[in-house]
Structure formats: C-alpha cells, structure tokens
Image (spheres, rainbow, N blue to C red):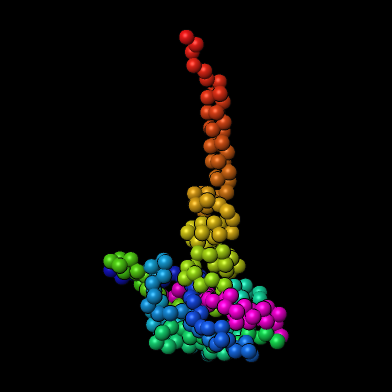
C-alpha cells in the first residue's frame, strides 16, 4: 500500500564526497554528489531519480546562487556552487571555495585536500514521498533543495548535532530520535538518560534520578541499621 505524505519536513542527509584529495583543484574547485539515487539510509528512505528536477528548475528560474556552507552553518558561506544537476547517479555538484577572500574557505580547502573532510550533506524539504508498508521503505520523490554543505564525517544519518541545529535555526523541531542522538553526541549522556530527556525533558530526568538516589539512600540506611539477632 502506498501513502502520500503531503506535509514538508526539513531534513539533513549525508553522502561521501567520493573524490581523492588530488582531485581538489588549487583554485578551490571540487565536485561530488550531494545525493545518490536508490540508496537506502538508516531511516529506511530512498531518494528517487527526478527528486530534484523541479527544485533545480526553480533555482535556475530565480537565478539564485546556492552557497557552499561549512557544517550547515548558514551564517558562514565559504563558496558557491557553479553547477547543480541531476544525472543517472544522483545530484551532482561542482563547487568553488573562495579561498583567496574567505578565511574559512581557505581552511576548508586545506582540510579537503588533506582528506580530513570527506562528506557532502544536503538540507532539504520533502515535497512528495510515498511509503510502502510491505517493505517499510519511504521513497522521496520530490525534494526542495535548501543548501549543500561540506561536512567532516559523511554519516548517511540525519540525526546529528548539526542536523538538530539546522532545524532549530529554521524554526523546526527535531524528531525524538534525532534529539536523543544529538544529546548523546553533544554530551556524555547514557542511552537511557538521553531517551528520558528526549521523551520527558531534563526536569523529568533530574527528578527521576533524584528519586532513585533517595530510594537507594533509604535502602542503604535500612541495611546499615539491620543486624542479625544475637544467639
């Protein structure tokens, strides 16, 4: 059974840049794929061919330049994309880092050439998707491209700290799994602690752990005051 999802959702999706350090030009140019078609991610989603066609047409019609962002930081553009297009493999991008004029671009270029940065990550809205209940796979058929970032680790997972920040900056709330994973990445919370915060809030965690500590203290005091009868 296929169901249409009409409500857009701001998401982040990561992909390996798939280029060698030697392929990064000295002038700051680079190329890669910001999305690959037909690859199922950890959330059971696949991007379908043609998903970016309308969005790319809209960008071209508006003569809008898409900036190269660093780790989804919208306030720190480090270059521009000279080409964004779909081919048989996916969303192909050709970007140019403004390394002679922007300090962050110069640093990103050095990291890219050294192989320390190895991912592209896209931020997008879901315009249209279908869900197959038999396979539990959601196919993303039409997407609105918001930005394409260079990222340190291509995790192929939209539940990262940057993804949560990306959503919050645009007035969106993260899903519980995204929030939980972000908490565990940003802070040394255990899985159960992060789950408690994501589901009930920090107050709930502090209250429950305080109550648990009180129960343990009561039990400890009771054991300390207990003695075997003398024969």
Q: Which residue sits at x=46%, y=83%? A: 91
Check the picture and name the quadrant holding the N terminus: bottom left
Q: Which residue sits at x=54%, y=67%? A: 163
Q: Which quarter of the picture shows residue 151?
A: bottom right
Across and down, in percent, residue 99 comes to: 67, 85
Q: In the depicted view, which residue is nearer to us: 34 or 2?
A: 34
Q: Is residue 132 left or right of residue 150?
A: left
Q: Which residue sits at x=47%, y=71%? A: 156
Q: Which quarter of the picture shows residue 101?
A: bottom right
Residue span colored magenta: 101-129
98 in the magenta segment:
no
Across and down, in percent, residue 154 comes to: 51, 72
Q: Is residue 185 above or below residue 48?
A: above
Q: In the depicted view, which residue is nearer to us: 137 or 170?
A: 137
Across and down, in percent, residue 83 comes to: 53, 89
Q: Is residue 180 above or below residue 134?
A: above
Is residue 56 visible to the viewer in this orientation of the structure? no
Q: Is residue 43 left or right of residue 29?
A: left
113 in the magenta segment:
yes
Is residue 16 visible to the viewer in this orientation of the structure? yes
Q: Which residue sits at x=55%, y=57%? A: 183
Label count reads: 0
Across and down, in percent, residue 213 comes to: 56, 36
Q: In the depicted view, which residue is nearer to us: 109 or 149?
A: 109
Q: For the view shown, which residue lies furthest in the top direction? A: 231
Q: For the view shown, which residue lies furthest in the front direction? A: 231
């Amino acid at each position: 059974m296929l169901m249409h999802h009409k409500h857009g959702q701001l998401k982040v999706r990561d992909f390996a840049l798939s280029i060698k350090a030697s392929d990064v030009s000295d002038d700051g140019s680079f190329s890669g794929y910001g999305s690959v078609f037909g690859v199922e991610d950890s959330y059971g989603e696949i991007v379908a061919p043609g998903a970016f066609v309308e969005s790319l047409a809209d960008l071209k019609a508006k003569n809008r330049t898409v900036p190269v962002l660093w780790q989804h930081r919208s306030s720190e553009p480090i270059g521009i994309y000279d080409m964004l297009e779909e081919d048989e493999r996916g969303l192909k991008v050709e970007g140019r880092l403004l390394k002679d004029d922007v300090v962050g671009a110069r640093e990103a270029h050095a990291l890219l050439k050294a192989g320390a940065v190895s991912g592209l990550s896209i931020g997008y809205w879901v315009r249209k998707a279908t869900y197959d209940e038999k396979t539990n796979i959601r196919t993303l058929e039409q997407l609105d491209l918001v930005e394409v970032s260079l990222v340190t680790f291509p995790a192929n997972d939209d539940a990262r700290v940057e993804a949560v920040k990306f959503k919050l900056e645009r007035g969106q709330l993260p899903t519980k799994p995204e929030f939980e994973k972000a908490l565990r990445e940003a802070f040394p919370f255990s899985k159960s602690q992060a789950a408690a915060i994501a589901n009930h809030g920090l107050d709930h965690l502090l209250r429950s752990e305080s109550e648990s500590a009180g129960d343990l203290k009561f039990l400890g005091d009771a054991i300390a005051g207990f003695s075997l009868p003398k024969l």
